[in-house]
Every structure is written in C-alpha cells, then in structure tokens.
Image: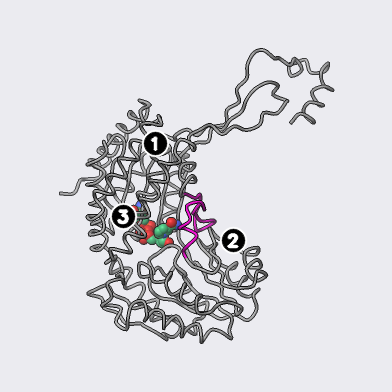
Amino acid sequence: MTKGPKALQKEITEGIQKQRDFFQSGKTRSYEFRKTQLKKMQTAIEAFDGKIKEALYKDLRKSETEAHLVETGFVLNEVKDTIKNLAGWMKPRRVKTTLFHDVGSSAIIPEPYGNVLIISPWNYPFQLLIAPALGAMAAGNTIVLKPSELAPHTSKVIKDMISKYFSPEYITVVEGGIPETSALLNEKFDYIFYTGSTHVGRIIYQAAAKHLTPVTLELGGKSPCIVDENTNLKLTAKRIAWGKLINAGQTCVAPDYILIQKNIKEEFINLVKKYWIEFYGNKPEDSEDYCRIISERHFDRLVNLMETSGTIVHGGEIAKEDLYISPTLLDEVSPDDSVMQEEIFGPILPVLAFDKTEEAIQFVNNRPKPLALYVFSESNGFVNQVLENTSSGGVTVNDTIMHIANPHLPFGGVGESGIGAYHHQASFDTFSHLKSVLKKGFRVELPYRYAPFAKNSATLKFLAKWLN
Ligand code: NAD
C-alpha cells in the first residue's frame, strides 16, 4: 500500500532529523570515519557488482562490459582515488596574510555542509547517484540518496546495498518519483546535488531557494559536434559514431547534432553508417551491446522527432514492444525541425552543413549553452576559433565524451546546462564549505585602526594602499 502524503512527509522529516542529530554528534568529521566509510563503500560495490549489472541490464539492456566501464568500474576508480587523496584534500589550504593584518596566519579550511540531498536520473542510474555520494562522504556529510524511479531495478539494488552497509542516520535511500522528491524538497537540506533535465532543474532550484540551500545542478542540453574539412574524417566519424550510441544515445554528453563543412558531409554520413554497422551489425536489435530506450514515453517522443524532421538516410527501424530504435541518421535537417528544438537523448543523429566557421559558431551561440561541445580539426586555428568564441560546460577536441573520463577535469555545465561541477577533488570541494580563517595573536597591536581617525588618517591611508 502506498503511503499518504502526510505519512510520507512525517517519515521523511523524522529520517532527516536523525541524520541532523548524527551530523551534530560530530562523528562524520574525522578523517578516520570518512576513510572507513569510503572503504566500506568500495567493499559494498565490489560485493554488489553482479547484482548492479543485472539490474542495469533489466532497466536499460546495458551490456556487462558497458555497465562496467560507465557505471561500477567508473565509480570504483573514483572511490579508490578519493581514499588515496582524502587526507590531502582535508588539509587547511594556507594562503598569504597581508601586512595590513599585522602578524597572523590565513587558511581556507574545508568543512562539511551537514545534511545533503543527491537526486539522480535514470540514464546512468548507478554512477550518477554514487559518484557524487563519494564526494559528499569524503567531505564529511550525512546523505539522503534519491535514485530515479525510471530505473526501478537499479534503484532497488542501490537501496539494498546502502541499507546493508550503512546506518540510515549516515546514508539513506529514499526511493520513488515526484511525490517522494517533492516531500524531500519540502525539507531543509544544507546542500542539494541534482542531476537530470533542465526542466526539473528549475523546480529543484526554486525549492532550494526557499531555504537558501546551495545547489549543484548537473543538467542537459544539445551538445554539438563541429567538424572542419581539415580533419581526419575516418577517425572523426568513428569517434562520433561511438559517442552517439553509448547507452543508445541516452547520455547527457552524447553528440546531439553535427555541424559539418558542406563539402565533406556526404563522405561523413557514409562513414558513420559504415562504423555503426561495424559496431552493431546489420541487425542492431540482435547486438548484445545495443541498449534500449528507457520508457514508452521517451520511445514515442523519439519516434515523433524522427518522423517530423529532415530525411532518414540510415536506420529508422523501431519496435515498440522492445523499446528498440535503430541507430538513425538524419540529413536535410532544418534548424526549425522538431529534432533541433530539444535535447534528443536517443540514437538519432541529425547532420547540418555550414560553409564558413563563423556560421557554425553563430549557430551554437544562438542556442542555450551546451553541456559539452566537440570540435574536430587538425588546424589549431580552427580549434582555437571555436574554443574562444563559444561557451559550454566542457569540450573534447577531436573526440567525444572523453573529457568526462579524465578525473582531473571538473565536470559540469554552464547556463542552462548547469551550475557547479564535480569529479575527483571538485567533488570534495563541492560538498565542502571552504571556510576562510584568519588567526591572530595578541603580541602585536597596531593602534592606527581605532577612532578617533583624524590623527592616524595619513598612516591608515598609507597602510590601506601599500600593505594589501
Ligand atoms: P528527470 O529530470 O526527469 O529526473 C531526474 C530526477 O528528478 C529523478 O530522480 C526524478 O524522480 C526527479 N523528478 C522528476 N520530475 C520531478 C518533479 N516534477 N519534481 C521533483 N523531482 C522530479 O531527468 P531524467 O529524464 O531522469 O534524465 C534525463 C536528463 O538528465 C537529460 O536532460 C540529461 O541530459 C540530463 N542528464 C544530465 C547529466 C549531467 O551530468 N549533467 C547526466 C545525466 C543526465
């Protein structure tokens, strides 16, 4: 039996109060506690690895190898990296003290925010919940995890794993959809980390604003690929063909559409077709490595985009009962077509042509800032022109997706594609308040700052100007 709204809210309020009390006890703050819990998370993921992969297959038909690369393996690398670097990240970061403050020392001290909420989507349902959780654990917070209801098997396995290894006053999982998330958002958290659509991102931001809660919003958008004629076209097509079809295109940083110089468009289209056949065969529906669309709603949305935009030059096959859409290339696409009005988030790739570089740049700049941008060229001049004249969350030059796989590059959006960034130390910093601390002693005392100012005015002005 589902709970009524009042019972649900009561349960959530009580759970959060327990987490607050636990945080106030100070137990989560020590290095030892954080390290022990992170190691426990590593053990938990290793023990549940098979079950997690099984669940990912049921939710998305994600193959074992892909699940390892982009979900459990990815998170295991991140947890090991976090354990290795934790002591260094926790240290106060010394900065200079100006002479104006006479004798003293200054440091930026990372401290936990307190009780944090992490909400994740369905497309990488394990990675996108647990990777941010590692940052929150490393930073010494208590955590409420809200997985996506659209990947129910993975949501359930995460709940089982977390409740087996962690006490609920430290980390707890609240499963469910809009009613559960809304009940959580009625509560005051010290930080909210949300991954999902820009539309829901606005709802989360508004709810956070009520309590002045700081947020990270990891959102989506249309990530373009700009392809110059002066490129290695075979590898360009191969790397785009690969990046587009991971998770059947349901990846926030998947290449959304292609802007390519007119004279190489035909050859590019033929190459992408060739590589897709090489990767998934002539019948991708039989490939072990080709994922399915998450739900009927998304399936219908994608079919509609396909049927109302440009011309299908490859693919276009569908099977609703299996939520299958074959890898599909669209040519003759107009900027006004429906496929260019929203993030595609599926295995459909529109190709648009341009003559001059400025046209491609203008095209990107006339739209919301993307989460990722890809530029393919062997000319540094072309690459720099694109880099200097566009804004996006991140960029990979001459490849797709890969900037998110380098842990040393913070990952996040800009403008409508998001606020904030994470991975590696950026995750730790995201979930820490970086507190500025100036320490002084009593041995030195400059008398000039005290009123009456008239007699010390010249000295004060001199100090303010020169001793900063
Ligand atoms: P979504 O916004 O529909 O759902 C995400 C989460 O929000 C879920 O946990 C869901 O329960 C909750 N939610 C949904 N509607 C809600 C509402 N009205 N009120 C409160 N909570 C609500 O997103 P999705 O469809 O699950 O994910 C796809 C989107 O996420 C795409 O736009 C994609 O680009 C983006 N995305 C971004 C990243 C990133 O790292 N930047 C990663 C993956 C996906």
Asked whether the residues under the numbered discs 1 and 2 touch, taking CB atoms below 8 Å apart as contact, a structural biologist would say no
Tell me what residue is drawn at x 44 percent, y 44 percent: 208
Q: Is residue 197 visible?
A: no
Residue 86 lies, in percent from the top left, at: 44, 38
Residue 232 shown left or right of residue 71 in the figure:
right
Q: Does residue 448 appear to the left or right of 389 in the view shown?
A: right
Q: Which residue type does callout 1 highlight?
A: Asn
Q: Is residue 18 magenta?
A: no
Residue 71, placed above or below residue 7? below
Residue drawn at 47 percent across, 62 percent down = 402
Lower sequence index among marks 1 and 3 = 1
Q: Quadrant of the C terminus?
A: top right
Indicate whether residue 417 is drawn in magenta. Answer: yes
**What residue is disc 2 on?**
391
Q: Residue furthest front?
A: 84
**Residue at x-position 47% and y-position 73%:** 240
Residue at 75% x, 16% y: name it: 451
Marks 3 and 2, how far apart at CA: 30 Å
Q: Which amino acid is tagged 2?
A: Ser
Kindly state the secondary structure of the residue where label 3 is placed. loop
Q: Which kind of residue does numbered mark 3 sit on?
A: Ser
Q: Label 2: few (<14), some or many (≥20) within 10 Å?
A: many
* Mark 3 close to ligand 1, CB under 8 Å: yes
Judge depth for marks 1 and 3 and give the one in front: 1
| Labels 3 and 2: the sequence-earlier one | 3
Q: Which residue is mark 1?
A: 141
Q: Distance between the Cα atoms at labels 1 and 2?
A: 33 Å
Q: Which residues are magenta?
A: 401-422
- Disc 1 versus disc 3: distance between alpha carbons? 22 Å
Q: Is mark 2 within 8 Å of ligand 1?
A: no
Return the mark for residue 148: 3
Q: Residues within 10 Å of mark 3 (few under 14, many from 20)?
A: many
